Image (spheres, rainbow, N blue to C red):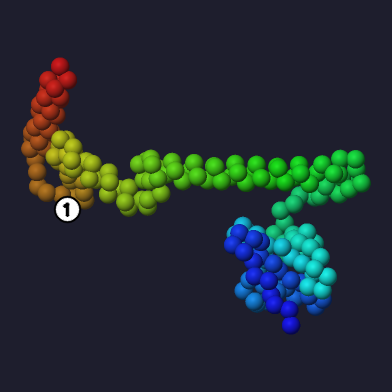
Amino acid sequence: MAKTKHNKPGDPITIKKYANRRLYNTQTSSYITLDFLAEMTRNDQDFVVVDAKTGEDITHNVLTQIIVDEESSGKQMLPVKFLRQLISMYGNSMQSLMPSYLEASMDNFRKNQKQFQEAVEGALNKNPLGQMAVKNQKQFQEAVENALKASPLAGVFEKALSLGQNDSAEPDDAPEETQSEKDAEIMALKKQLADIQSKIDKLDS
């Protein structure tokens, strides 16, 4: 009985395809499906599919079948115009150049895609504003409130806010306060603002 040849580290995984169309993974000694092969491809796992009887490399045929199955399942990615153009290249004088051209184009596309993803992730990780953008609204609101509390104008803002809330309250809930008292508080707030502005001007001079 022939022994199964074990792959060396770095070698592609050998998949055997039998006459009954079953696929056998020689690395895990288990039968797999085309869907599993598709997942291996998405995970950049290198493999080669060989005919179990003849040893012929049929990787191209199997990968083509995976594409056909994906397109037939409703996950269509290849436009009709592209398919027409691709078919028209068969028998064309440029056919021999198409494999290397398509391979280089896809390599460049995936490289640019990876660089773009890394650039976006790096910007979000390094930029505080980018990190804030991915937080929820509650966290953002808390950050703003904390910033206001740390401001030298915090007391003035809170006082002004309380006056505005009292003005908009219902008559039954409003505290009994004369107009002259409100005017006095407003004047006091204006004086506080003026004093703070004066201190800021002295710091700048």
Depth check, front residue: 140 or 185: 140
Badge 1 marks a residue whose secondary structure is loop
Q: Position of residue 65 (x, y in %)?
A: 77, 63
Horizontal placement of 177 versus 75: left or right? left
Rendered view: 176 above or below 72: above
Q: Residue at x 79, y 63 (%)?
A: 57
- Residue at the spot of label 1: 173
Q: Amino acid at mark 1?
A: Asp
Dividing the image into 4 quarters, which one contains the C terminus?
top left
Give the residue at x 9% y 47%: 176
Residue 148 quadrant: top left
Q: Nearer the viewer, residue 176 or 8?
A: 8
The percent coordinates of residue 181 (x first, y second) are 7, 37
Q: Quadrant of residue 193?
A: top left
The answer to whether any part of residue 179 appears in the image is no
Q: Residue at x 69, y 46 (%)?
A: 106
